Amino acid sequence: MAKLTGLTCLVVIAAFVLKCSTSPVPKDLYKGEAISKRQNIMRWGDGNFAVGKKEVPANGKEISKRQNIMRWGNGNFAVGKKEVPANGKEISKRQNIMRWGNGNFAVGKKEVPANGKEISKRQNIMRWGNGNFAVGKKEVPANGKEISKRQNIMRWGNGNFAVGKKEVPRNGKEISKRQDIIRWGTGNFAVGKKEVPANGKEISKRQDIIRWGTGNFAVGKKEVPKKQ
């Protein structure tokens, strides 16, 4: 009788285990396949991601090294928990910069709608396929070609310069090593942001001294009007 009782117990336990193993998984649980080294990131067989305990419903493919950045098979990105709906291709090393297949950029979470080609090493400078520049989040609408090493100096295909965010409308050719000195194809100079209208040829090593082809000088911003 004791043997029978023991056998009965084993049968009951086995039946219970079998029932538990075949029970359906609750609807609110997913079968996680990988957990990243970062806290609370899970990926499922269908490619979906969870950030924390919230599932992101797109077909996730990878998680970047930056916090809360995900890319899906359709190329979309999520910054934090917000999905960026364009066809994302890469994330730059700078924080919150994304480039999509159509060349568009996002600075932070705001998309810049032009055809972006590159981001300079300086913060918040972008150049597009049409040559336009953005300084910060503001686009400079001329056909930009280069940015100098000094802050906020841009030159366009028409030769014009911008000092800061203000364009100097002449055909600029160079910027001197001194701050805010510009020379144009006409030979004219600008000292600071003010143009000196004679045909300038050189700038001396002393501050604000300009000599023109006529031999006249400017001391500071005041011209000595004639070579004697």
Image (tube, rainbow, N blue to C red):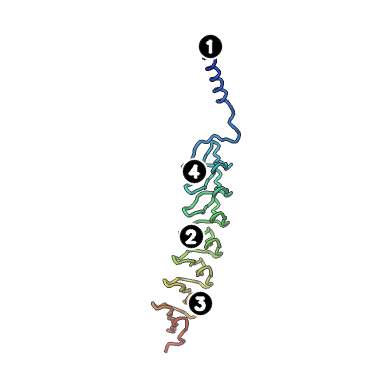
Element type at mark 3: strand
Number of marks present in the image shown: 4
Residue sitting at the far left = 205
Element type at mark 2: loop
Question: Within 10 Å of the Cα at label 4, are there few (<14), some (14-19), or many (20+) other Cα atoms?
Answer: few
Q: Which residue is mark 2?
A: 123
Q: Which mark is residue 140?
A: none
Element type at mark 1: helix
Q: Nearer the viewer, mark 3 or mark 1?
A: 1
Q: Nearer the viewer, mark 1 or mark 2?
A: 1
Name the amino acid, label 4. Gln
Real-space Cα distance between discs 3 and 2? 28 Å
Q: Which residue is mark 4?
A: 39
In this view of the protein, which residue sits in the foreground, 111 or 63?
A: 63
Considering only order in the chain, which callout, 1 or 3, is on the residue closer to the N terminus? 1
Real-space Cα distance between discs 4 and 1? 51 Å
Q: Which residue is mark 1?
A: 4
Location of residue 141 with respect to 215 vertically, above or below: above
Residue sitting at the far front = 2
Q: Position of residue 123 (x, y in %)?
A: 48, 60
Q: Position of residue 215 (x, y in %)?
A: 42, 84
Q: Quadrant of the C terminus?
A: bottom left
Q: Which residue is mark 3?
A: 194
In this view of the protein, which residue sits in the foreground, 149 or 169?
A: 149
Real-space Cα distance between discs 1 and 2? 81 Å
Inspect this view and state whether residue 133 appears.
no
User: Would residue 200 appear left or right of 19 to someone viewing this image?
Assistant: left
